[in-house]
Structure formats: C-alpha cells, structure tokens
C-alpha cells in the first residue's frame, strides 16, 4: 500500500463549488444558445432572437485566428474565479443577445475543464499509482489491433489505468458495467490477467461478447503462432543454407575426383588440391559461422516468440498441435508464469446480462463477489451516474473508473417540474450544490454537450446542409400542414436523397403527411427563400459547438462534487484519458475509498504500537493511499 498523499492533489469541495458558481453565472446567459434546436431555427427566428451580430462576422471570428483569441494572459490560479470573465461584454444585460463573439470565445475557453484546473494529468496519475510497484509482465508489449482505431485507443489507455489502480489497491476483481461487446473486459482479462465480470443489459450483447471473446483468444493464439512461424521460418532458412553448402561441398568433391582421374588434362597435379583445399577451407569457415551463429540467433528468435505468451494468463489460449510437440518448453513456461499468477486466482472474463440501476444488488448478479473495482467505458445516459452511486453505497466496491457518454439520455430532475415522477435517483444533477440551485440544462443543451469541438477544429466539419434541409422542412410543415411540434423523427434520410425536393418528399411520407398536398414549385420556393440564410444556421451551430465543452464541464463537475461529498471516499479526480479527436468523450471520473478498520484491528494496533502509533494509523485510513 502506498504512502499517504502519494496520489496527485485534486481540488477540494469548496474549490469545486466556487468553480460551479462561476460556471453557472456564465451559463445563465449562454444556455439559451445550447438549448435552441436547429429544427426550429427558421420557424422561431433563433438567430434574430439570440445573436446581435451578422453571421459573416461570427464565422470569420470562429474560423480564423480569432477562434482561439489570446489578447489577455491566462489568469493565475487565485484569479480564476468570479469576475474574471466580463459577462456584460459577452451578452446584453437586457436582451440577453450575444454581443461579442471574441469575448464569447474567451469565456468558453476559461470555463473548460482544463482551464478551470479540474483535470489530473494521466501520466502523473499512472506514475503515482505505480510507485514502488513493478510493471506487469507484458505491459510494454505492443497490443494486437483486434479493434478499430478508436476503440483500440480507448481500450488500451483505460485498461492500463484500470490495471494500475487494481495493482495499487490490491484488487483482482473488475466489474465492467455497460460492457457492450466486451472489448475492454476481454483485454483486461487476456492482457492483464484480471478476473472480469462484464455486465450489459442486452442479452444479445452478452452472447456476442462471449463469442467475440472466444475468437479473441484464438486471435491471440494466431498472433503467437505467427511469431513462432516467423522464428521457424528463419530457422528453416538457415537449414536450407546449410543444406546448400553441403551440396556445394559434395559437388566440389566429385569435381576433384574427376580431375584426379583425368591425367591428360592441362592442369598441374598440385593445382587442383590447392584449389580444393582453398574451397574446402572457405566452406568450413562459412559452415562454422552458420553453425555457430544460428544457435545464438535461433535462441533469441524463439525466446522472443515465447515471451509474447508470458503476459497472457495461464490457459487463456488453448495449445494446438503446433505447441504440443514442444510440451516440455510449454511446461517450463507454465511453471515460470505460475510463480507470478496464483492458480487459485485465474483470469476469467464472464459476460453477464443484467439491467444495472443505483439500487442493483451486486451479490444477486455476481455470486463470488469480492472487493473489486467498478469500471465503465462510455456508459450511456444514467448508467454513468448510477455506477458512481453503486460505488458509493456498496462496501465491496473499493474504486471506480467511469467514462460517460450520451448526455442527452440523462434523466434530469428539474427538467419537467410540472410532471410528477416516482424516480429517486436522477442522472442529473447528482451533487447537493446543483440540487439546491434546482439547476436544469434541458435535453437540447445536454445534446449539444455531445458535440465534438476538437473534431471540428481539425476540419471534420458539421453537416450544415442536412441541418439546413431539416430546418426548412420544419418551416414547410408549419406553414402548409399547420403543425408546430411533431413527436415523430425524420431520421437519417439525407444520405439517401439526391436533392432537397427528394428529401422533402421522403420526409413527409415518413412523417405521415399527404405529400400531394404541396407542389414541387412550393417546395423549391421555400428552398430558395432560405438558402441565402444558410450561413446563419452554420454560424449558430458553430457557436453551439464552441459552447459544448462548458456544458460537459458542468456535468463532469456535478459528478466530481458528488464523489467529494461522500464521507468514505478518500480520493477522487477527473482524468483526460483519450485523444478528443479520436474519442470526444475523453474524461474519466475516478475515485478510491478509505480503508475500513475493524475495532479489533484498532485495538491490536494500539496494544502493539501504543496510543501514538494508533492515532497515526487512524490518520492514514485511506483504502488505497
């Protein structure tokens, strides 16, 4: 167990509350932009209502160098609080309209996770977790690419962190909630030798994960077999070289015998033996080199081939006939790995089907539940906050590492206050501060929090034309069908359409409207009417994208504050795990519990070490610190 304070310091609860207060002050003006739906952009005159700027200036500012303005120095830590962002320069105090896109961009940057000082560096945390710990066998081995690039990036980074936390806390059991296709669970089991339970609500996913894990084991084996094959190929090549030299020697001997038998040739008797001796000496020298060097190279090559298996758990890959012939070496490797992996603690991946809520009883799902680490990679909607609640309420769960996603699917306590719900555990807000504020984001704002600013920044633009089509369609539905709100969704029709006319016809049919009620001419007139204003929609969506990280910051701050409020949580942090271009939802919420001492343990410590040592032990009451 590491020494007290070995993990990086993180902001305390009062500091987080100050950050929340400052962020809410900004969002009270900015939330209207995030809450506006692009479907209603023209029907509700969104641009005119919320922005007091021409769209050309907004696009120029956000696309050009002003998109990341640096006219003011970054605030010092003590200055990063209320008052730093001059909000009256951002929004009009009376109309609440956006006044300055430059001031808006500065404010958004200030209220990001990184600028608010909420993030613990990933490498710094890994270093702290590994203090006085040896890396597991195989951690430096390049992982097999059995997933797409995005998933591989996510799984490798998160698995490394999970393994480090598990080692730090002395845990062997991992519960992967929302495990889906089982990529993370399989990787944790196969590479790091952990006992993993992957829980997903979909029975189809569970069966798929079992089959995928079976194939994945085979994949590991095939990779190993390929490595052996490469080594065998080199050995075969060497054997062929030796065989060729023996053939050359045989031919040389035959030629010499022939020359000796032909005394009438114009060749002196001493010339042939001299040549033969020279040739033989060269062959012997080459043969000597080839017999001496291959042994060294061969051993090295085969050793590398076998070393790949060292980081796999015992029997994770079933041996085939190509391995059976080398049973002796297999037993040697097995005995070697038995020294680091106890037979009583085998690595297992067990996919299970269960719908997880905050009230789920883990003992009913996992019969051999023990002290464990609960993890989740891109847990959808309420599953992320429920994971944190399970961690806080279940004594067996000693740590949590959760990366959430799908913020728009969160249940929100104060969103529909006119309706009564029996629900107790809401997805948002979680912390007492926001509950007391009765803060509400709304679904559209939470949806905008899922937008990927970093992807847009590197040129992966927004689907402006499809959004424009949908906004104009809504205006047609309002003007010609008399419907302002429609519960049905158009869906992904844009990619199947060759023109706006085609898009409207297909959409009206899907929504159940009589498409013959509106002529082609009317449809095209609507298109031409709004086409000059497409830049308004594009500029507005850029504002939403730039604002998205602030909404995500609020959701992450809410979760971190909730963990800080729990009395038995010793350490909690936000960590940026992934490259946001590859994986936009890149932040992990991590927490570790305090160590629970029994009264008997306290008494024995006091008796053995005296009252002073007992109080020292009480101060060092962290489970994993």
Image: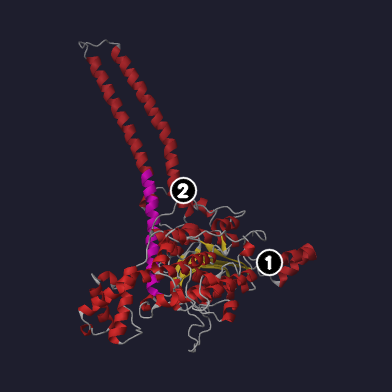
Residue 253: name its quadrant.
top left
Instruction: Give above or below for 494 relative to 218.
Output: below
Magenta segment: does it hold 214?
Answer: yes
Q: Residue at x 34, y 18 (%)?
A: 277
Q: For this rendering, which residue is in front, 84 or 580?
A: 84
Residue on which the image places disc 1: 621
Residue 159 image offset from top left, x and y in percent? 49, 60
- Judged left or right of residue 618, residue 591 is left
Query: Which mark sits nearer the N-terminus, 2 or 1?
Result: 2
Picture coordinates of residue 462 (x, y %)? Answer: 37, 66
Residue sitting at x 54%, y 72%: 88
Quadrant for the N terminus, please. bottom right
Q: Is residue 417 above or below residue 56?
A: below
- Principal SS element in the magenta part? helix
The x and y percentages for residue 247 are: 29, 29
What residue does disc 2 label? 307
In front of the other: 258 or 409: 409
Q: CA distance from mark 2 to mark 1?
A: 40 Å
Q: For residue 233, what is the image quadrant?
A: top left
The stretch in magenta equals 202-230
Residue 307, how many percent across, how many down? 46, 48
């Amino acid at each position: 167990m590491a020494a007290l304070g070995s993990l990086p310091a993180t902001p305390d609860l009062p500091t987080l509350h100050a950050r929340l207060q400052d962020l809410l002050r900004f969002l009270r003006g900015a939330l209207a932009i995030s809450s506006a739906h692009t479907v209603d952009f023209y029907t509700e005159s969104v641009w005119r209502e919320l922005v007091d700027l021409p769209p050309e200036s907004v696009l120029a500012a956000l696309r050009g160098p002003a998109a990341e303005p640096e006219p003011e120095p970054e605030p010092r830590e003590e200055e990063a609080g209320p008052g730093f962002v001059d909000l009256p320069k951002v929004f009009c105090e009376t109309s609440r309209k956006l006044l300055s896109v430059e001031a808006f961009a500065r404010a958004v940057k200030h209220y990001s996770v990184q600028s608010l000082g909420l993030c613990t560096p990933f490498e710094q945390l890994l270093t702290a977790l590994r203090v006085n710990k040896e890396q597991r066998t195989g951690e430096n081995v390049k992982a097999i690419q059995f997933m797409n690039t995005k998933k591989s990036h996510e799984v490798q980074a998160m698995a490394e962190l999970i393994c480090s936390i598990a080692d730090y806390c002395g845990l062997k059991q991992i519960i992967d909630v929302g495990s889906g296709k089982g990529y993370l669970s399989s990787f944790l089991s196969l590479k790091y030798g952990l006992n993993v339970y992957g829980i997903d609500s979909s029975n189809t996913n569970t069966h798929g994960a079992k089959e995928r894990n079976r194939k994945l084991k085979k994949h590991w084996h095939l990779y190993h077999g390929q490595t052996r094959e490469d080594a065998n190929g080199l050995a075969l090549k060497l054997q062929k070289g030796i065989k060729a030299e023996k053939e050359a020697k045989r031919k040389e001997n035959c030629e010499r015998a022939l020359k000796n038998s032909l005394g009438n040739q114009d060749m002196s008797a001493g010339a042939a033996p001299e040549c033969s001796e020279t040739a033989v000496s060269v062959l012997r020298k080459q043969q000597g080199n080839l017999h001496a060097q291959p042994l060294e190279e061969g051993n090295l090559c085969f050793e590398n081939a076998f070393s790949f298996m060292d980081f796999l758990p015992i029997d994770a890959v079933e041996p085939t006939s190509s391995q059976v012939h080398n049973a002796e070496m297999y037993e040697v490797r097995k005995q070697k790995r038995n020294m680091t992996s106890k037979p009583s603690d085998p690595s297992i991946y067990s996919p299970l089907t269960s719908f997880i809520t905050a009230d789920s009883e883990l003992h009913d799902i996992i019969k051999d539940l023990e002290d464990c680490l609960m993890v989740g990679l891109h847990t959808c909607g309420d599953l992320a906050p429920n994971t944190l609640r399970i961690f806080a309420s279940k004594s067996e769960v000693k740590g949590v590492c959760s990366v959430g996603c799908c913020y728009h699917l969160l249940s929100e306590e104060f969103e529909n206050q006119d309706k009564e719900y029996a629900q107790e555990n809401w997805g948002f807000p979680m912390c007492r501060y926001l509950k007391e504020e009765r803060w509400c984001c709304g679904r559209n704002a939470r949806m905008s929090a899922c937008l990927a600013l970093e992807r847009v920044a590197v040129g992966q633009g927004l689907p402006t034309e499809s959004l424009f089509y949908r906004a104009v369609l809504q205006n047609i539905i309002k003007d010609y069908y008399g419907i302002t709100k429609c519960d049905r969704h158009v869906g992904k029709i844009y990619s199947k359409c060759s023109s706006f006319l085609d898009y409207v016809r297909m959409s009206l049919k899907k929504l159940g409207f009589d498409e013959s009620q509106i002529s082609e001419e009317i449809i095209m007139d609507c298109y031409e009417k709004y086409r000059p204003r497409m830049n308004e929609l594009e500029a507005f969506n850029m504002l939403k994208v730039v604002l998205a990280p602030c909404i995500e910051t609020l959701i992450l701050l809410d979760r971190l504050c909730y963990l800080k409020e729990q009395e038995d949580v010793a350490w909690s942090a936000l960590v940026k795990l992934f490259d946001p271009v590859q994986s936009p939802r890149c932040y992990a919420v991590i927490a570790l519990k305090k160590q629970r001492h029994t009264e008997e343990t306290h008494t024995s410590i006091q008796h053995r070490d005296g009252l002073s040592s007992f109080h020292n032990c009480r101060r060092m009451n962290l489970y994993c610190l």
